[in-house]
Image (tube, grey):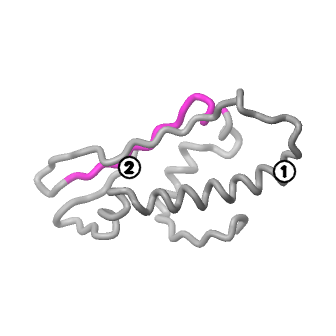
Amino acid sequence: DWFNLQIPDSPEVNQATKNALPSDRILETIKSQLHVEISVQTEDGDEMVLELWTLELDETQFDTSLKAMNTVYFRMGILLKSLITITRITPAYHLSRKQRTESFTIFYR
């Protein structure tokens, strides 16, 4: 574990992420914007988007004078921990903790 983060992952979500972000094309994928949609569907079939996340790489913000590996490692650790903290206060996170298939189901796309 590179960043000392212990996060229980769903194998299905893990595989979907690997399919959406192939390790040999992560940068190309993020350059063209990556959208993650979290929605909820009730037992009646009603559906609503709870969150829409957009990730994009802005190459104009690159600082080529920095030593890449140490800086990337340090900044990614901070970014991931901040992202986890932020996602824990969103409606989708709280609903997913209470999720039961007989009342509603959380989906991602």
Identify which residue, 102 or 83, lies in the foreground: 83
Q: CA distance from mark 1 to mark 2?
A: 32 Å
- In the image, 53 versus 28, the foreground residue is 53
Residue drawn at (71%, 32%), measured in percent from left and top?
61
* Residue 66 pos. (x, y %): 86, 42
Disc 2 element: strand
Q: How many numbered marks does the figure carry?
A: 2
Instruction: State the residue in front, 91 or 39.
Output: 91
Of residues 106 and 16, which is closer to you in this image?
106
Sequence-earlier tag: 1 or 2: 1
Work out whether 62 lies above or below 69: above
Q: Nearer the viewer, mark 1 or mark 2?
A: 1
Mark 1, secondary structure of its residue: helix
Q: Is residue 39 magenta?
A: yes
Q: Which residue is mark 1?
A: 69
Q: Position of residue 24 (x, y in %)?
A: 71, 41
Is 57 colored magenta in this rendering? Answer: no
Residue 108, disc: 2
Can you say which quadrant of the picture contains the C terminus?
Answer: top left
Q: Residue at x 84, y 51 (%)?
A: 69
Q: Position of residue 96 (x, y in %)?
A: 33, 64
